[in-house]
Image (spheres, rainbow, N blue to C red):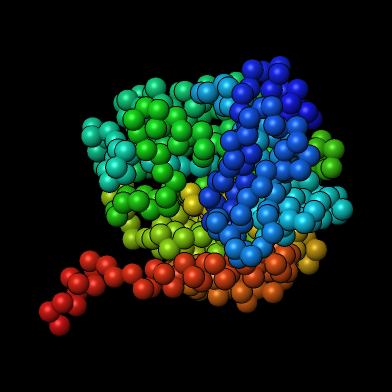
Amino acid sequence: MVKDLAQFAKENGVKYFMVSYTDLFGGQRAKLVPAQAIADMQEEGAGFAGFATWLDLTPAHPDMFAVPDPSTVIQLPWKKEVAWVASNCVMENKPVNQAPRNVLRRLVDEAATEGLRVKTGVEPEFFLLTPEGDRVADPFDSAEKPCYDQQAVMRQYDCISEVCDYMLDLGWEAYQNDHEDATGQFEMNWKYDDVLQTADKHSFFKFMMKSVAEKHGLRATFMPKPFKGLTGSGCHAHISVWSLDGKKNAFADNSKELGLSDQGRNFLGGIMKHASALAAICNPTVNSYKRINAPRTTSGATWAPNSVTWTGNNRTHMVRVPGPGRFELRLPDGAANPYLMQAVILAAGLDGVRSKADPGRRHDIDMYQMGHTVKNAPKLPLNLLDALRDYDKDKTLKSMMGDEFSAAYLKLKHQEWNSYCSHFSAWETAHTLDI
């Protein structure tokens, strides 16, 4: 584990460091710092005007400093003279409580005091588009059911394999890559890890995927629903809880239903209990709700939930338990903030464990065909405004995520919603001009 960034630079030929942090909207912000100056930056941090990014700060606030966490440093595999390092935001020597990585770090520490070490894996889906972003990059990728298309994935081999090779070199234990259910859509997978490490890797993966795609004359987008009629991009999370030494899976109990322990069932109960509020974080954009509330796609299924239900190994529900000792949350989408997504999963699950929440009855039906027969399952929010209102009403979850964070997030997201509502669209003209 790296502790001294200046020494790391000398040993690895690094000329510059990208001192990076993620804002409330998932935007990755950075300063490019010469290696000769990194020793001071490691102590004091790189200075930013927080108001200039998506944080609830004003131009009058003091400088915000991003203090690099040397344990996260990654030498860019495609540009070895530069290294990326995740950072923690401070202001006047105090943590910025609304900063996403700080929110997650605090919850990790809180869970540890109760003997919980949460591990997650993510499954980020994305599209490879033309540089203009208006269409799928591969004109031959046009099958009605394109999922796992052998020819299509090989036509993008150079880009996909380059990123996978980098993940293998970084020790992430990448294990599969595939063409997903929409034309031009792909998914890449690597091994699960502690939630903070998963969030750091997820953040870097998005940066790496976009950078390598640009190198190949492509544009990678994690937008939840870039095209009408095509399956949207999810970011499913596989969740388990372990002993603090990481040796025992506390979710695994083969004597229980689906091999999920009582504690695992309670953690799942917290996810179910707070699901509608989770959507405000896991589905954070206006576009997100065109994925989870979409009509059937051209491939035959959206592969996204619309109701708060759970099941065994069945992909038509919000949560599935594919095997003993873990479960998969299928709610998050490609726009989810890597840090806030992990934080809200941790917060909801921790509350579930504390309150011994019951996830309710398991449903093993095809929700796409038989969902109308389930009478007692809440529907997921229909739009971003409904999700924000559900989050605002969920006092427990808001408090666990942090009052300062929650106030800032709700304020800026309501502004985003209002901006959307004031936008005039071609749909309005088409449906209203001749009334």
Instruction: State left or right for residue 151 relative to residue 124.
Output: left
Question: In the image, is residue 79 above or below residue 61?
Answer: above
Q: Nearer the viewer, residue 43 or 173?
A: 43
Q: Residue at x 29, y 70 (%)?
A: 424
Q: Residue at x 65, y 36 (%)?
A: 85
Q: Is residue 207 left or right of residue 110?
A: left
Q: Nearer the viewer, residue 232 or 134?
A: 134
Q: Is residue 423 left or right of residue 89?
A: left
The reply to whether residue 270 is visible in this rendering is no
Q: Which residue is found at the position 68% from the left and 54% from the top?
A: 63
Query: Residue 9: horizontal and vertical position, in percent?
Result: 69, 22
In the image as oriented, which residue stretches furthest toward the left? 434
Q: Quadrant of residue 340?
A: bottom right
In this rendering, position of residue 370 left or right of residue 143: right
Give how far across and how far down residue 362 sits, in percent. 60, 60
Q: Where residue 355 sits: x, y (%)?
A: 78, 67
Q: Position of residue 241 (x, y in %)?
A: 75, 47
* Residue toward you, 373 or 143: 143
The residue lying at 52 percent from left, 38 percent from top is: 207
